[in-house]
Amino acid sequence: MSGSDAVTERKLLLTILSLSLCAAPVMAGAGQQTLVIKAGKVWPITGSAITNGLVVIENGKITAVGANLAIPEGAKILEMPDKHIMPGLIDGHCHLGLSLDVFAEIEETVSAVTPDMQILDAFNPLAADVTKALRSGVTTVLLAPGYKNPIAAQMAVVKLPGGKKDAGVINRSAGVKFSLGNEALMSDRRPTSRPGLIAQVREELNKAGQYQEGKFDPRAEILKRAIQGQLPVHIYCNAVDEILAAIIIIDEYKLKAVIVGAREADEIAEMLAERNIPLIYMPTLLLSNDKDLKRVGRIAAAGVKVAFASYAPRTNLSDLRTSAIIAAKYGLAPELALKGLTINAAEILGIAQRLGSIEPGKDADLVILSGDPLELTSGVEMVIINGDIVYQKEQK
Amino acid sequence: MRGCVIRLIFLSAQLLAACTLCGQEKTVAIRAGEILTISGAPIKSGIILIQNGRITDIGTEIAVPQDASVIDASDAVVMPGLVDAGALPPVRGDLNEQSSEMTPALRISTALDPKSRVLKRIVQTGCTTLYIAPGGANLIAGLGVIIKPVGKTAAEMVIKDDAALKIVMGSDSTQGNRIPWYEPPTTFYYRRPTTTMAVAWMLRKSFFDAKQYIASHEKEDPNMEIIAAALQGKIPIRVAVRRAIDIRTALRIANEYGLSLILDECTEGYKVAEEIAKKNAPVVLGPFYYYPRTSSQYEEGREVNWNNAGILAKAGVRVAIASNSQEGPRFAATQDESIDLLTAAAFAVRHGMAPAEALKSITLTPAEILGVADRVGSLEKGKDADILILSGNPLAATTRIKRVILKGETVYQD
Amino acid sequence: MVSCKHIFILLSLFLLSTVTAGSAAENIAIRAGNILTISGGVIENGIILVEDGKIKALGQEVVVPDGARVIDAKDKYVVPGLVDAQSRLYVIDGELNESRAVAPELDILDAVDPFIKERQEVLAQGVTAVCVAPGNRGLLGGLGAILKLSGGKTAKDIVLRTNVAVKGAIGISRSNQSSSLTRLENYSSIREALLETQTYMQQKRKYDQELAEYEKKKAEKKEQAKTDDQQADKGDTTSRAAKDKPTRPAKPRTNPTYEILARVLGKEIPLQIEAHRVDDILNALRLADEFDLRLILDKCTEGYKVADQIARRKVPVIAGPISTSFLDTPALEYRNHDTRNAAILSKKGVKVALGVAGRDGASSKFIALAAAMAVANGMDRHAALRAITLTPAEIFGVADRIGSLEVGKDADVVIFNRHPLDAFSQVEMVLIEGKIVYERK
Amino acid sequence: MRFRSFAVVCVTLIVCVVSTLGYAAPVRKKVAIKAGKVITIAGPEIQDGVILVEDGIIKAVDKNVEIPWDAEVIEAKDRVVMPGFVLAHTSNGLDAQNENVPEVPFLSTFDSIDPVSPFFEDSLRDGVVAMLVLPGNNTLLGGTGTVVRPYGRTVETMLIKRYSGLKISLAPPVQQTLRYMDGRYSYQSTASVSRMGQMQRFRRYMAELKDYLEQYEQRKKDAKEQEKSFDEEIDPRKQPMIDLSNGKLTAFIYCGIAADVPKAIEIQETHNFNTALVLGTDGYKAADLISKKKMPVILDPQLVVWETNEETYAEEMKVAPAIFYKAGVKFAFQTDTSEYGRRYLWYQAATAVRYGVDRAEALKSITLYPAQFIGIDNRFGSIESGKEASLVFLTGDPLDAQTWVDKVMIGGEIVYEKAKDVRLKKLLEKPKPEEGQQTSQDKNTD
């Protein structure tokens, strides 16, 4: 990149850092004292929406939600009569902060099987896209490796670093990513063909099955945990044949699996439903034909649990909500679209006990929007993570 | 009209699932102008009864049950669904696992795409049973599968998995096995065979190793398992060969290890028809071309004989005609070039094959070669109701497929 | 027998065509809850009267002539047909660029495929016109055009206006390798082309003068010849020898490239330059200053950084994509892309049109969503709506036909069940030139 | 009366000249063909008809023609005789199909036709008696074509009509042309030029041509004024395009995809060339457009295209001839030498019939129509008195896959007989084992 770019790059980074820092005094206090947010509308997701509701936050946790609650004395009150408040959005699959620039370096293609890698080791919390990410309303993301390895790395669930730098990691090893898409086929590395791809995945899983403790084989060790159901497996596949292959492998090895991508899953949705395999749907922004845009609605209608992903930086993190809205516009039930952004994603990623809805006892990760969450016209006004205001739209 | 076709296909898929669950199901009766049973003599103005996807009765004097739904084809010719013993694989991407030359355990069945366009087309050309093989770039390419072209999942389609082990002789398996100047020698293309000699040698070696493997079973090896099974005749071996000398070599090796082969393509088979007949190795012919193509894999077998099928058949070889056309980086044939079998048969007759033989070679003979003659390939009591309804003589260029029935369900209607 | 069959077929074809024509001629009156005219505010409970493809009248007290088909849209929003200013609809993939760097005479109309399938889908989202332009691989890629989504089997049937702008590009990274030198090269070679055009024009003028001179001389000679002859009759032969024939000046070869660029310099055709980074944008502006041409800034990714300068020059901007998510793989020059770009520009008083700039033709259906996203990022609601209707029409000089609901304009009307910028608003009906081309089931 | 006889003499003279031009035919030769069935194309089919040929020209065809005593009689009781097939467009039989410069209208295939090319031998074997050989599809203004018989040792003897048809290609030159498969375009290797470029270059060429002609006229005028002699010739390189403009030539415009058809029509309208369209696989999309213009159409060798229905995902067959037949467009076929059935004109016609084209129309589309398209229908395309006796003797119905071309007559001469076709024998019969041994022995002796 040429010099001027570097300069602007740094400028932007600094501005955003300073922005979050300027918010620091607020949250320094906020940590201890209780914070009460009065919003025009509260979307708890698990319950029905509350007009003119309150959310009470004490040291980073939500303690109460409701229409008319007694405000504890000494509480700091945020008055937002015309704003909507909802739980922080959860991105089911992205590649944030894996490189210094928007072009992520996420593929480790030297070897096709690398379950012992951990994506978190490549995560750079100070990367430009991470610092920008806060204003997208997304508070928690699943960091995933790329698409070219049949068995890629362990994925991590992190909260976007806001006030405190290490607020991040929730789960360092949230699952292993598989890729049964044609992206995993390369001309100069095994596998080069679909049957070869499936054969190789089987081979590795069999090896793991026979693996005994003691002798050092980190890959087999990880995969064994997957087979025993301790470690979920996220299988990336889009076309029908890819998904069918995934289902066969899931059944064969009793994997605790999630389907990622799943573009054409509607054509075999009931198979996923009866196995209740949830799926993290690809960004609908990557689709353009009505035929494809209508698919996700049908999938959810068939009773499959659907969450959304941004594949950031493939699409902007801020377009996670856009993708959900487009899905809704093309037939997905609105409430499911909202759930897909929050509680469903939390459940699929196994963090529902802490995140995904506005309920007493859950982390105070909140987004305050200028309007209805399912309106594209409504923008993010404020983002709160663990009760700290980490982003605030600058007033002009 | 065409719109309904696919709905029918979906429907049929569901019904297939349904009828497997619940036993009894409505009878279907076909009134045919002429029935070409293939196995027996043709029947003029006959009736076929179908129940649960099987032919329950066939003949002239048959009482049609009241509740039966009747398909009137009294002005049409009815024949068994075609059997393509080497169909275009409904698989996306490369059909060869290039990372190794020996991939006997490679199962093409694991990569079937039930929604593939290829299948929908093949059905409309009258094929109701297909043999799908891996690509022809590896010496031991892997295991083929026999399917019916309609189904929601691979499991629904497959008739017989591990149907045959594909071996490729001649120059195809040597393709690309060298160091491209721009690649470091670490690439896995740096390997044998690069000559026809090495092809033969490696084949011998692998069978020899298999023998050893059977003798002393120290550790499990999936690849060896397959070759051993083939050696013991549990899995039929299909060898793709074009030139006469390669055919001879194949037969020689077969002798040495007491194998029984099926020969694919066999472009120059007419030169060694007697030898093939003597070994009584069946032959699956195709693809067909008038003069050898200029592209590399057609260089060999340049001495074409249009009447290859006829000559082989006359010599007493069991001949099946298949499209044998494969997609993929190493094959010239594309989807549109995969000719339908009726045309192929018609031209076989034109070039000197007996009409009856030709019809057999796209129905019963391939079914026998594939070992599924008990289910498909002819119109007989108890066989699958895979039926073709044609506007006229199947070998006429102006004849049109009016209806394709698969397991008693109409999957295509014109 | 065959021939009579032919005749029959032709007859039926003819009848068919007349029938369709008939439906176009039919008068339509739309009773609308709210009419967003764009040009003249909102009319509540108004009526739009459509007669032979044009808007005959609109307002609250319009008398509906008997015989007119009345469409009831009481609780609906009626807006002018949406326009995607950065579309690839109709254009065949891989035909966007010619290898030559400077080829402004290429016409995108020649790369149009009228038989595409996507049209209906895009139409169903309320888009009635798109602006298509050559790609950014050439420095001067060719001429853009405005196409309507009315069905039609030839480019002529669907085109609203050709030669709307010459598409140029500065500082586009090849395979994500960008160097400041190539940028310089881009800028300077466009400049060169323009300078050459000027000299070319001079030559042509020179030729015209010379030609006129020559004609004059020739006429004189004729005169002289006559007099000479008379003298000759008198028997003196001196002057006949002194006859030097005037020579016709050689006509300079007409060069289509320069012919087009001449029209650009003559402010007849605007120059639409795709520029992303600040330096490229500034270069483009410098070109506009130097040659005093009508500039349109395309993409203008980092425009928000130099909004004032753009505003001062009164250069219109086609901002887009509103989000890099619409792109296949965001190229290098999008690194500093900001979703607030359009908002900031329009706030600074720049005339901003929005485009989808999607990955394929069908993406144009997202134009309303793009506008909504612009609003979410701080753009004024009305400005956003204007940016996908009237503004692009103005920028490309078709505001007399489309872009707003006014008397005399084409009846390209879309009926939404909610405000067009609401995510869940559905298109109920689309009219193009008074013909109902889409109706929701 | 006298005048008529004079005219007749003239005609016969001309005919003699013409026929002798083409090939060495002994003068005043009478042939009578007794055919089991005559498919005249011009009229109804005749059972047990007689065709009377004089000097290679058909004199009469009917059920009972009395046969002159000096006529040589060809017994073809068990044969179907019909006019020889005509191939309206091919680029085979050339050493190379395209020049690598976009604008070369002045080239002619006449200089490149290779009489010994196996293509011509095959064509004769397959019953083709006349074909228009044009440059390939990769050149914008490819050059002029040549109508030849697939018979003769030199291009002169093969020649029917020199300098006929000019090839224009609107598709950009690419390795794999943009083809219509799976309901969408697959575009493997793009060339450096685009469709925009092609059209622009074409317009530029026409503009410059106009310019040139104006100036030429101007110079002529000046010369006249100045009492100079004007001996400047028209630039021969421009002549073909000029002839195209004034209707001496027919433009064969190649439309690689349907979207090129409107542009071809535009060209036709602006310059009013008489135009024939050479279509790609998806040309059927523009059928009604073409039917409005009543343009002749030459179909892609691949007649059946699969298209995926967007709503139902069904694979639908699109059969070009059927669609054009419904739209009332006259069409002719191309052949594809590498393809299995497509290499035969009769098979193409049979395919058309299979998918609903009227039989008579299908037969016309391999005889009369192509003859009309390439402007030789006054001599070819049907069995009528006055036309050249270029006939095929078939063993059965022309559209039956089991039918062979038994004999081919060109200009009254039997030039092909299946019985004497050595190559065909080799291709159909089993090689004698001795041959192989012989050769090996020879090797040993060496």
Image (tube, rainbow, N blue to C red):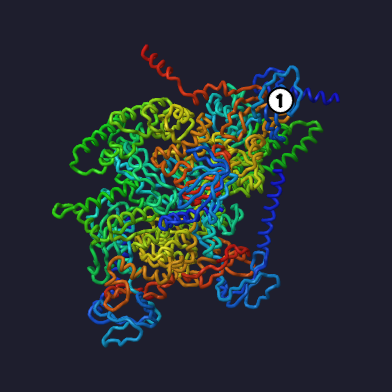
**SS for dot 1:** strand
Residue at 29% in and 70% down = A352
Does residue A222 appear to the left or right of B307 in the view shown? left
**Farthest residue in the right direction?**
D1
Picture quadrant of residue C269: bottom right
- C170 shown above or below D53: below
- C342 shown above or below A250: below
What type is the residue that disc 1 sits on?
A: Ile
Does the rendering let one see residue C249? Answer: no
**Farthest residue in the left direction?**
A214
- D71 shown above or below C73: above
**In the rendered view of the protein, which quadrant contains the C terminus of chain D?**
top left
**Farthest residue in the top direction?**
D445
Number of residue marks: 1
Chain of the residue under the numbered disc 1 shown in the image: D
Does residue D260 appear to the left or right of C168 in the view shown? right
Crowding near the residue tagged with mark 1, few <14, some 14–19, many ≥20 C-alpha atoms within 10 Å = many
Front-most of residues A195 and C21: A195
Q: Position of residue B81 (x, y in %)?
A: 48, 44
Q: Position of residue B110 (x, y in %)?
A: 34, 49
Front-most of residues A13 and C431: C431
Q: Which residue is mark 1?
A: D57
Does the rendering let one see residue B349? Answer: yes
Residue at 44% in and 70% down = C375
Front-most of residues D39 and C384: D39
Picture quadrant of residue C400: bottom right
Q: Position of residue A364 (x, y in %)?
A: 28, 75
Q: Position of residue A36 (x, y in %)?
A: 30, 82
**In the rendered view of the protein, which quadrant contains the N terminus of chain D?**
top right
